[in-house]
Image (cartoon, rainbow, N blue to C red):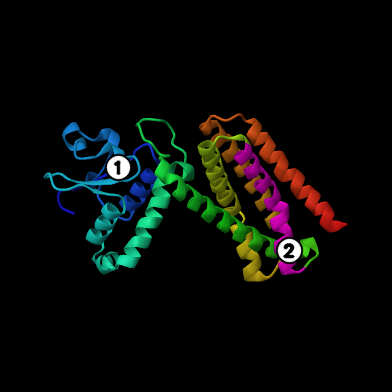
Amino acid sequence: MQNKLIIYDGNCQVCVGLRDLMLRLRLVGEQECVAYQQLQPPLRQQVQAERFRNEMALIDTHGGDTLYGAEGVSFVFASKLKLLQPLFRFRPFFLLFRFLYKIIAFNRYLIATPKKQTISCDCYPEAATKFRLVYIGFALLLSVCLTAFFGVSVHQALGVGPGAGAGQLLLMAGTGWVIQIVLAALFLERQQALDYVGHLGTIMVVGLLVLVPAICFYFITGLLFYPLPVLSVLCSSGLMLYLHYHRVQHLGLSQRWTVQWFLLLQATAVLWLLYFQL
C-alpha cells in the first residue's frame, strides 16, 4: 500500500477499535493510519470534509485521488490480502460490502458513543435515515432470535415446551421494549426518536449477548443449570441499565426515560409471568 494513508475519525470508538484490530493482526502499520484530528494541513486538504463525516478516507501522499468509504476499505484489504482481490472485484459482493459498510458508518455513534466531541462530525445526515432504519431492523431481528433461543433454554423452568418457552419469553422480555419504542415515536422529535430507538437496539443486542453462554450451555448439554441463566439475566439487566443511563445522557434526554424504560421492562415481564402461571 505504497504512498497511501488511512484517515479515520479519532472520535469514533468503532473506528479506533477497528484500527487497533488491524494493527494487532498486522494488516497495517501504525505509520499507515492517522486520525483526522492529527492530520497535517497539507494532507488535510486532500480530504473532503462533507464526505469524511460519514466515510473513512484513503489519501495518496503523492497527490493521487482520495478514496472514501467502502472503496477505500476494499483497496486496503485487497492490497494486504491478495486472495481477496477477485472477491472485491466481484460486483455483487462489493455492493453487499458497501451496503454493510454504510450501515456501520452511518450508525457508528450508536454502536459506541464517542467519549468526547473533538471533531465537527455530522453523524446524522438526512440521507442516513434509511441506514438508521436498517440498523434498527437488524438489531431487533437479532434480539428476537437471541430471546427466543434463551426461552428455549429455560422452557423447563417455565413448565412448557421449547416452542412455547420461546414465545412466552418473547412476550415477557419484549413487550416493555415495544411500548418504550412507541412512546419514543409519539413524544420525541422524528430524528431524536430515530437516534433513541437506534441506541435501544444497541442496548438490546449487547444485553442479550450476555445470555449467550447460558444458551450455549443448554444446547450443548441439554441441561438447565438454574444459577447460570439467573446470573446471566441479572448481569444483562445491570449492563443494559448502565448503557441506557449513559446513552440517554449522551442524547441530552431526561433520565425519566431511563426510569420509565426500566419500570416498563420489569412490570410487563411480571404481568406476563403471572398471566402464564394462572
User: Residue 233 at what x, y percent from top left?
Assistant: 67, 51
Give the residue number, with chain letter if any, for mark 2: 165
N-terminal of the pair, mark 1 or mark 2, is 1
Label drawn at residue 66:
none
Asked if residue 89 shows in the view, the reply is yes
Residue drawn at 70 percent across, 50 percent down: 175
State left or right for residue 226 relative to residue 70.
right
Near-viewer residue (262 or 115): 262
Based on the displayed image, in which of its 4 quarters is residue 262 positioned? Answer: top right
Give the residue number, with chain letter if any, for mark 1: 51
Position above or below: 250 against 2: above
Which secondary structure class fits the magenta region best?
Answer: helix
Q: Amino acid at mark 1?
A: Arg
Asked if residue 213 shows in the view, the reply is no
User: Gap between marks 1 and 2, in whole Å?
Assistant: 48 Å
Residue drawn at 63 percent across, 38 percent down: 186
Near-viewer residue (39 or 110): 110
Based on the displayed image, in which of its 4 quarters is residue 14 positioned? Answer: top left
Instruction: Name the front one of labels 1 and 2.
Output: 1
Residue drawn at 66 percent across, 31 percent down: 256
Which quadrant is the C terminus positioned in? bottom right
Secondary element type, mark 1:
helix
Q: Which residues are magenta?
A: 161-186
Crowding at dot 1, Cα within 10 Å, few <14 / some 14-19 / many 20+, comes out as few
Crowding at dot 2, Cα within 10 Å, few <14 / some 14-19 / many 20+, comes out as many
Which quadrant is the N terminus positioned in? bottom left
User: Residue 21 at what x, y percent from top left?
Assistant: 36, 51
View extreme (left): residue: 62
Question: Looking at the image, do the residues carrying marks 1 and 2 touch, with CB atoms under 8 Å apart?
Answer: no
State left or right for residue 109 relative to residue 229.
left
Position above or below: 170 against 247: below
